Image (spheres, rainbow, N blue to C red):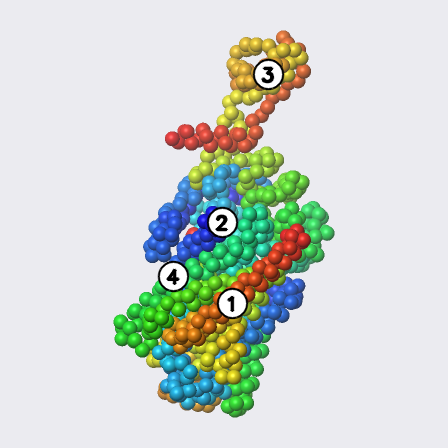
């Protein structure tokens, strides 16, 4: 088993270490996310000040939701892996086909390494800033709070893992479309707004008009933000939380199957074109 | 006044270092160590108009740094440099209008545009007047046989075709000097020959000064009257190829195929290197016994089928040169 | 060939390239339209739930939103070369090629890849402005139009300045820096709401640090003919977009320092 996984682990590791070197990029990402978080929270606060009773989630929870979202923003599948586009353009894909590996899994491992390496330093910094520094300086009203309880914490760990798996599965589909269309910008331009709205990154999904809820809660991207974060502060608990996890897992599987299928077809086409 | 003047040129960079592995990557996030890299330590040479000079040296010797400084992209740490009376990095815009550069590994054409559109745009960028541009373009198109490629987007060209287009692109504004950085890298044999032939004609017929860096010793052999060898940021040699050769290889080789069994030779200053049943490889020092004399001596006593003197290949010359130099330094 | 005509040639070349990939260009344009349409969806969702925010209606916020998006899209269309400078020019070494040409780097960079797709976003911004006009309603007399155009011009200068700064930083970092998204996309985000909903410190940042309020909030107050609830005098409101041009000028000073640094390190 270990021998089988080795190349994929290596692919993950190489990518992960490479990206960790971009110290400035990590700090920059952190700064960006602090700023966005602050703006969003100020906007929410202004609305809540006007009519708090209308809100589906309490202000402290929306604040935590916002910081969580900022901390894990880089885990969202909103741009296809730039390395894939590069590989296609330079013909490096050919090399990948020469390796005695399952290409889907290989790319999956690389992309996983990429997004985790991008997200990890920022998430840690964000946790320190919003979870520790803010309460220390007397701004606990605006801080990132700990999970609602032990049950929420355990469920969140599972939901978080699924969220990453799901994110990479979405990215893999995007990667394949990039590879097939040779156009990363177009793919990203379509992917980004979809992910931002339907994951709940823009606003928690329950802020949208009530009539849209059944659809919003069932679609795959809800598993990227809305479900795990609401599990975190126990807005989803018990059976509802388990349903959320099942939804994440189910969609992850569906997307992986779809991605594999699309990739096989795309590779066959590449082979036929000799490219 | 030489066209290119380089005096005591030096250039150092600072590069970040990190320890390998996860721990190294993490600690690199917090603190970086810097290492000073001296790309050029002390380099001086000059180049007259119309010369063709090859820059030779292993990776990291400082060739690319030199080309970048000469073309005005980099500013040296110290030293003096003038090209056609201008200091390239001080007067970049005026300087680059008079030079052409071809990087073997990079393209200056527009990937998605047809070749001809790229040429038009370059003529605009370099402010070439329309009729001069037309004349120059047609001339280059004919010389480089570009006619059938003009309407194709650059991305569809083969490397050899693209390189020909790159040469035309670098010459549209009629530069006085052409810098070539690894121009034949990755090309197939016919394309390499075409590039060499073109560069030679450009130099001879249009009197364009050419400074070439290359790894391909055949380029040097085919083109350069003069070779500069650099290593570790210093100039190691600046001479003609022949002089360079004789400076490192005192001895020459002579191959003799005999009509009968190879004899035991005993001639002063000649050593038998290898021996088969009917042939000998001899090493001799032309200063002690010139080749014609040696050949005469052998053919006078023995029946010989074939005989030839071998010059050491230039790869060998350069490799040997570095060996000598390293041992001299150590 | 003067700079303006050369710029025209660059535009022509960019359009020809995009015309080779009509499907991709269309996809991208739609994508940009969607990206911004979706933002206003978020704003709408909040208003739908809460009714209004600190005395501002959806229509009024839509005017802030529409103008700042038009502004940003224009800037974004013009400065792509600076935006991708780190990744596409410094890291790949393509900046050497720019330096090898006898034209200013600035001209070559603004001439790089002028993207038609941003038109989608500009159109979307215009649609939102029309929507706001009907909701508020706004009376577009010549003075109001002039203020709007002037605010957009100042805003384009400001965003261009931010992108020039971003490019300048990539001389040091090699990668294009995401942090600048704080000021570009984050700036759009901040400027699409009226300034008085924010905390005090943040208002000061947006007025005196990165003067986004000067190209969005204050001139829009003048268009809406609302006095500043924070007490800025009426006469100053239409003058504030000047700050955007000042910001651009300062950015170019930094850019020159970056160019000097590149010449001494090569990346």
Residue for badge 4:
A121
Q: Is residue C48 visible?
A: yes
**Residue B202 rendering spot, x and y as whole percentages:** 64, 43
From the top left corner, tell me how far across and down residue B136 is, in percent: 67, 52
For the C terminus of chain B, which image quadrant? Answer: top left
The tally of labels here is 4
| Residue B296 is at least partly visible in this image | no
Distance from Cα at disc 4 to Cα at disc 1: 29 Å
Q: Secondary structure at mark 3?
A: loop
Callout 4 secondary element: helix
The answer to whether marks 4 and 3 sit on the same chain is no
Residue sitting at x 59%, y 69%: C28
Q: Which residue is mark 3?
A: B276
Label 4 vs label 3: CA separation? 69 Å
Pointer 2 or 1: first along the chain: 2
Q: Nearer the viewer, mark 4 or mark 3?
A: 4
């Amino acid at each position: 088993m270990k021998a089988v996984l080795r190349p994929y682990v290596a692919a993950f590791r190489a990518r992960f270490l490479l990206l960790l070197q971009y110290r400035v990029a990590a700090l920059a990402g952190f700064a960006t996310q602090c700023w966005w978080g602050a703006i969003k929270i100020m906007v929410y606060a202004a609305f809540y000040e006007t009519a708090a009773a209308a809100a589906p989630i309490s202000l402290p929870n929306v604040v935590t939701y916002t910081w969580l979202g900022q901390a894990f923003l880089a885990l969202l599948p909103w741009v296809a892996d730039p390395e894939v586009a590069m590989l296609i353009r330079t013909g490096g894909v050919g090399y990948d086909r020469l390796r005695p590996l399952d290409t889907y899994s290989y790319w999956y491992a690389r992309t996983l390494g990429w997004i985790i390496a991008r997200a990890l330093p920022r998430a840690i910094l964000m946790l320190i800033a919003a979870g520790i520094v803010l309460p220390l300086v007397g701004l606990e009203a605006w801080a990132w709070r700990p999970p609602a309880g032990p049950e929420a914490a355990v469920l969140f760990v599972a939901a978080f893992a699924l969220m990453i798996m799901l994110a990479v599965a979405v990215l893999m589909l995007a990667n394949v479309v990039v590879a097939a269309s040779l156009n990363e910008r177009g793919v990203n331009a379509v992917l980004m707004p979809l992910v931002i709205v339907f994951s709940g990154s823009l606003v928690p999904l329950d802020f949208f008009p009530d009539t849209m809820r059944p659809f919003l809660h069932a679609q795959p991207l809800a598993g990227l933000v809305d479900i795990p974060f609401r599990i975190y502060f126990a807005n989803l608990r018990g059976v509802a939380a388990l349903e959320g996890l099942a939804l994440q897992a189910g969609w992850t599987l569906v997307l992986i199957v779809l991605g594999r299928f699309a990739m096989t077809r795309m590779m066959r086409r590449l082979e036929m074109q000799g490219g | 006044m030489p066209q290119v003047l380089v005096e005591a040129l030096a250039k150092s960079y600072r590069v970040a270092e990190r320890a390998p592995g996860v721990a190294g990557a993490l600690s690199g996030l917090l603190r970086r160590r810097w290492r000073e890299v001296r790309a050029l330590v002390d380099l001086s040479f000059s180049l007259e108009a119309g010369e063709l000079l090859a820059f030779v040296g292993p990776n990291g010797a400082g060739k690319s740094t030199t080309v970048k400084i000469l073309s005005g992209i980099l500013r040296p740490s110290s030293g003096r440099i003038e090209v056609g009376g201008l200091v390239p990095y001080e007067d970049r815009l005026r300087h680059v209008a008079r030079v052409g550069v071809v990087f073997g590994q990079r393209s200056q054409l527009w990937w998605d545009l047809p070749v001809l559109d790229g040429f038009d745009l370059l003529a605009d960028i370099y402010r070439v007047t329309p009729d001069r541009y037309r004349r120059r373009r047609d001339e280059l198109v004919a010389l480089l046989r570009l006619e059938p490629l003009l309407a194709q987007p650059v991305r569809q060209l083969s490397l050899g075709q693209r390189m020909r287009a790159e040469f035309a692109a670098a010459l549209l504004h009629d530069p006085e000097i052409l810098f070539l950085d690894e121009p034949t890298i990755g090309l197939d044999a016919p394309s390499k020959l075409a590039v060499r032939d073109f560069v030679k004609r450009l130099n001879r017929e249009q009197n364009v000064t050419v400074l070439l860096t290359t790894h391909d010793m055949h380029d040097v052999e085919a083109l350069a009257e003069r070779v500069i060898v650099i290593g570790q940021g210093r100039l190691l040699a600046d001479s003609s190829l022949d002089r360079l050769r004789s400076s490192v290889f005192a001895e020459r080789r002579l191959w003799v195929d005999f009509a009968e069994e190879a004899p035991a030779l005993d001639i002063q200053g000649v050593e038998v290197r290898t021996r088969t049943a009917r042939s000998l490889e001899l090493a001799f020092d032309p200063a002690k016994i010139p080749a014609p004399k040696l050949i005469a001596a052998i053919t006078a006593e023995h029946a010989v089928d074939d005989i030839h003197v071998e010059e050491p290949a230039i790869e060998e010359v350069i490799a040997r040169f570095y060996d000598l130099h390293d041992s001299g330094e150590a | 060939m003067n700079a303006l005509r050369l710029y025209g040639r660059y535009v022509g070349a960019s359009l020809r390239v995009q015309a080779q990939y009509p499907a991709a260009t269309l996809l991208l344009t739609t994508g940009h339209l969607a990206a911004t349409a979706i933002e206003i969806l978020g704003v709408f969702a909040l208003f739908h739930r809460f009714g209004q925010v600190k005395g501002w209606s959806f229509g009024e916020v839509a005017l802030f939103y529409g103008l700042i998006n038009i502004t940003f899209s224009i800037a974004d269309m013009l400065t792509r070369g600076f935006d991708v400078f780190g990744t596409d020019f410094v890291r790949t070494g393509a900046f050497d090629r720019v330096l090898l040409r006898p034209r200013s780097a600035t001209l070559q960079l603004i001439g790089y890849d002028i993207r038609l797709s941003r038109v989608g976003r500009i159109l979307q911004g215009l649609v939102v402005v029309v929507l706001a006009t009907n909701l508020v309603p706004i009376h577009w007399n010549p003075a109001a139009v002039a203020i709007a155009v002037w605010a957009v011009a100042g805003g384009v200068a400001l965003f261009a300045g931010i992108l020039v700064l971003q490019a300048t930083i990539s001389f040091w970092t090699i990668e294009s820096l995401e942090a600048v998204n704080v000021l570009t996309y984050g700036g759009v985000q901040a400027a699409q709401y009226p300034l008085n909903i924010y905390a005090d410190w943040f208002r000061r940042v947006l007025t005196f640090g990165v003067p986004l309020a000067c190209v969005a909030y204050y001139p829009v107050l003048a268009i809406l003919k609302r006095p500043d609830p924070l007490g800025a005098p009426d006469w100053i409101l239409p003058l504030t977009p000047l700050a955007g041009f000042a910001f651009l000028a300062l950015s170019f000073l930094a850019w020159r320092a970056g160019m000097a640094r590149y010449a001494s390190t090569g990346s």
